[in-house]
Amino acid sequence: MKFIANINKTSNHLSTIADNLKDSEEAYFAVAFLKTSGLKSLLNPIMDFLKAGGKVSIITGQNFALTEPKALHEIRTLFEKYPTSKLFLAKANSADNVFHPKLYLFKSKNDCRVISGSANITHGGLVENKETSIIVKCKENETIWIDSKNYFDELLKNENSDEVSLLVIKQYETYFEQQKQYNKKAKPIPTKTKSQLAFDYNNLIKHFKGFNNSERQHNFKEKLSNYKKAKDVLDQIADSTRIAQKQFESLIDSLVGSKDKENLWHSGSLFRLRRSVYPYFKEFRELVRYIRDNKNQSADIVFENAKEKVKRIEGAAENYITEIMMTYNNKDFANMNKNPLTVLRKEGGVNIKVTSSSYSGSDYKEYCNLIKEISIKLGLQNMLEADSFFNEIYWKIK
């Protein structure tokens, strides 16, 4: 048994944790607060540990909104390369049951070590604050290790925590943004609104099952058929070197609708502004060609470059871009307009930008990843079915 304190730059919790990572194959951290300052201090030792084949599980708390979403994003991104390592966010269901441990467990072939005390994964907690802990060296079959590891495993159960996904982070961000200006008076748990509860995955699944009938299947098949036809229309525009003005107008109308034609896409703003697009055949063709030629590129790159091209087309904006992108690649590109954005914000409590015009390429890539994550969770086939699902919820709550 050994006493640990933040004494100086070389003798502190950071150096102790880093040294133990070097000698371990498995690590388990449970901390109340996780901040970018602490992650920055600990990142290189964790990276070396992972590269050496180690695996780490980290659980942190959301009470008082002191854990930083940016730190969650960084660890989630890092662990995508090392899928045996996991990040969890403790649930905050009661003000009387605050998540507040500071526990670091290390396991090697020969022995185990338990560190428990007052240090969170913050720069202050690891290096500068007046923090103390006790480290106990033990064997895997000793009671202190068995009890410590069992306690950690209990924290990771579904009723106590969520494995950190993009949606989990976005929902936590809402609470974080609400509370950061009141940090001194921060609530110990997020205030869950009715709409936030409605977007819980269990309730989303109920939503989905409610729509899971012959009519929903029929609507989805019809949407698949419409977008296949839309692709043919876009190909006709892209492959034409010259086209009569009336013909181009007719093709646009077939996509967005008119008095005489049903729309293959579904967006009221596209229909209302279609006449403004009519004079811009060459520019529109260039936009379609670019997206078609780059349909397998990263969403952020395609979206960012397409935004520059769509500026030359009066009456067209990001909603045209994402409709074209989803038409050509409904596995990776999601439609983005008022309907899904409203559902994600109002029903999900997700911290997401309100208007598509404010999205950068990186914003759109994150948005696509979020929709894909939800689709996988619910068993949706592609972005088209996800778009149908969000539209059904939107019109139900409107």
Image (cartoon, grey):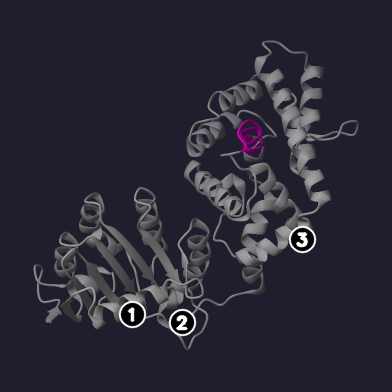
From the image, state whether disc 2 or disc 1 is nearer to you. Answer: 1
> Element under label 2?
loop
Q: How many marks?
A: 3
Residue where numbered disc 1 is placed? 101
Residue where numbered disc 2 is placed? 188
Chief SS of the magenta region: helix
Sequence order check: which comes first, mark 2 or mark 1?
1
Residue where numbered disc 3 is placed? 210
Residue 326 drawn in magenta: yes
Question: What segment is highlighted magenta in the picture?
Answer: 321-330
Where the C terminus falls, by quadrant?
Answer: bottom right
Where the N terminus falls, by quadrant?
Answer: bottom left
Q: For the residue marked with disc 2, what is the amino acid?
A: Pro
For the point 63% across and 71% down, the residue is: 197
Q: For the residue marked with disc 3, what is the amino acid?
A: Gly
Q: Is residue 67 left or right of residue 209?
A: left
For the point 51% across and 60% down, the residue is: 170
Q: Is residue 201 above or below residue 268?
A: below
Residue 370 drawn in magenta: no
Dot 3 crowding, Cα within 10 Å, few <14, some 14–19, many 20+: few
Q: Position of residue 30 (x, y in %)?
A: 33, 73
